[in-house]
Image (cartoon, rainbow, N blue to C red):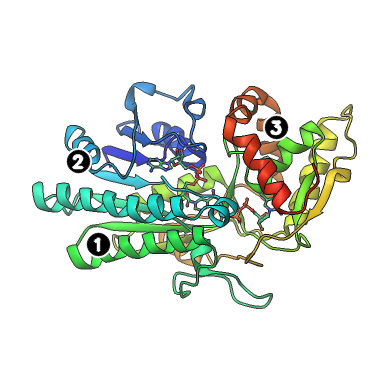
Amino acid sequence: MQNVLVTGGAGFIGSNFVRYLLEAEPQVEIVNLDALTYAGSLENLKDLPDPDRHKFIHGEIGDRSRIDQILRDHAIDTVIHFAAETHVDRSILGPAQFVETNIVGTFILLEAARHYWLVESALSSEVRFHHISTDEVFGSLGTNDPPFSENTPYAPNSPYAASKAASDHLVRSYGHTYGLPFSITNCSNNYGPYQFPEKLIPLMISNALKGLPLPIYGDGKQVRDWLYVEDHCQAIREVIKTGIPGETYIVGGNTQPTNLLVVTTLCEILDECLPNSAYLPHESLVTYVTDRPGHDRRYAMDISKISTDLGWTPRQSLAEGLLKTVEWYLEHQDWVDAIGNKEDYQDWLNRNYLTRGGEK
Ligand code: NAD
Ligand code: TYD
């Protein structure tokens, strides 16, 4: 890993990863290609450590000639592919962009990497295409089902999950057919600094600070496996450095609370951090709304492969991680305001909330 192309590095996990990698790997040069959709922001890339080793390029993963140029100009040996449309609710209301970015975009990136590494340069042993994927490709677990493992069959339920599943299959096929050295991580729900406030945890914090309803979909008893974003970044680096090419690794947080427990815990933390808030107790803002169509009930992860083979386990407990996250959002109100002022954001939140039977 010397000259790295990160795609989607102005989004939540990608920007955390860029920051992390600049610190962890002092020799690495990073090219960060991001289309700056509603979910990406240069605000996420302020104050990078050693910024001279980071070059931001505003562009699309679907722009083949641009990708070809970037790979050549920067002699890229490692592609770490985060760029995607990522919000399940948006994929329900507008799936087309998910097909375009997550499937077609990944295909174009794979073609460019294959061509540059295997046709033009014959570099196959020193390169890696690392694909960032999700646990959602496996579908939903029943209460007593064993957790997802690398052997769980794919059964995606939302257009988002289906588009990520398709991209995983494409990546795998490029390894099998063309010998492209790849790895895939299927990770559970991330949380932490710089997460766009449409996902559960930052939305709840941001709404609670404004005294707005905290919308719980359905009965709130759905279960997610939560991982602090820095732990995910460490896992990705470990897989790229010591994981076996052609392998998939499940990454998760070993903690599976209900959505309701996550939200009430956030409310308790906010009550303690803001004893003079006008909205105490914050839990009184909890509002039950119509469930998400096709809502997956439960995710859980079996991380024995990555922990046994690569020695990675999550370091951050959920209690500490949630506290750190709330503190980060309280200290970065300017960031929340900059993101929240994006024209699309408030429109989207209102549309999504009204779709769920919420009242204005
Ligand atoms: P995000 O929505 O915060 O960021 C996505 C980034 O991709 C944005 O900066 C956006 O501008 C960029 N992007 C979108 N379309 C693009 C295109 N055509 N060309 C270039 N850039 C484009 O997403 P995230 O939560 O940081 O997720 C990153 C990756 O991790 C995704 O592949 C996602 O599927 C995966 N993942 C996310 C989670 C999670 O909990 N957030 C969990 C597991 C896996
Ligand atoms: P989300 O953060 O959208 O991630 P994903 O759907 O990819 O798991 O949602 C996490 C869980 O929280 C999911 O079960 C849906 C639920 N949820 C709510 O109950 N209310 C909300 O406002 C949001 C955004 C999510």
Kindly give the residue lying farthest to the bottom in the view shown: 144
Q: Which residue is located at x 14 percent, y 53 percent?
A: 118
**Decide: marks 3, 2 in contact (CB < 8 A)?**
no
Residue 256 lies, with reference to residue 329, above or below; the image says: below
Estimate the spatial distance between the alpha carbons at disc 3 and disc 2, rounded to whole Å.
41 Å
**Which residue is pictured at 49% across the width and 70% down the height?**
149
Q: Which of 96 and 301 is in front in this view?
A: 96
Crowd band around label 2 with a 10 angstrom C-alpha radius: few (<14), some (14–19), many (20+) = some
Residue under numbered circle 1: 174
Which residue is identified by label 2? 68
Whole-percent x, y for residue 126 in the image: 19, 49
Q: Earlier in the sequence, mark 3 or mark 2?
A: 2
Q: What residue type is labelled 1?
A: Tyr
* 20 with respect to 259 (left or right): left
Label ID, residue 327? 3
Amino acid type of the residue that numbered disc 3 sits on in the rendered structure: Glu
Percent position (x, y) of residue 49? Answer: 44, 24
